[in-house]
Amino acid sequence: AVRKVAQRAIYRGDLDNAIPLYGQLIENGKLLEEVIHDLRDALYRYPIDISIWQALGDAYARNNLLQEALDAYTKAEELLR
């Protein structure tokens, strides 16, 4: 249910609500593949949104995809400059 609410929020462009919901799923280690898929999709619409890149890094890290996590965090850091 949390993922569906997060997906709808992203679809509406409501990242302020979507990202914390995805954060809950990531923290709990739930639906990590699906969360990664959703966040990667969101980047097509919002390619320079730092919060999405950070959440994607968190999801990759929680899923033990460490190189992908580093790449996502690096992209977030580059956008901060």
Image (cartoon, rainbow, N blue to C red):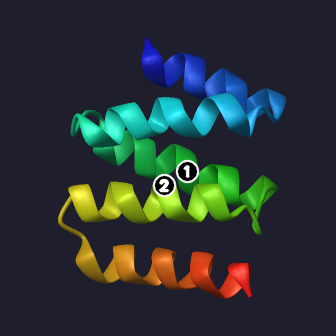
Q: Residue furthest front?
A: 81
Name which residue lies at 57% across and 40% down: 19
| Quarter-of-image position of residue 70 | bottom left
Mark 1: secondary structure: helix
Q: Please, is residue 2 above or below residue 13 in the view? A: above
Q: Which residue is mark 2?
A: 55
CB within 8 Å, label 1 to label 2: yes
Percent across and percent down for residue 10 are: 70, 34
Q: Please, is residue 37 above or below residue 23 in the view? A: below
Q: Is residue 31 left or right of residue 4?
A: left
Q: Which quarter shows the C terminus?
A: bottom right
Name which residue lies at 59% across and 82% down: 77
Mark-to-mark CA distance, 1 and 2: 8 Å
Q: Which mark is residue 56?
A: none
Q: Which residue is mark 1?
A: 39
Mark 2: secondary structure: helix
User: Which numbered disc flags the more N-terminal residue, 1 or 2?
Assistant: 1
Name which residue lies at 51% across and 63% down: 54
Amino acid at dot 1: Leu
Amino acid at dot 2: Ala
Label 1: how many Cα within 10 Å (few below 14, some 14–19, many 20+): many
Of residue 21 and residue 36, the one placed in the foreground of this image is 21
Label 2: how many Cα within 10 Å (few below 14, some 14–19, many 20+): many
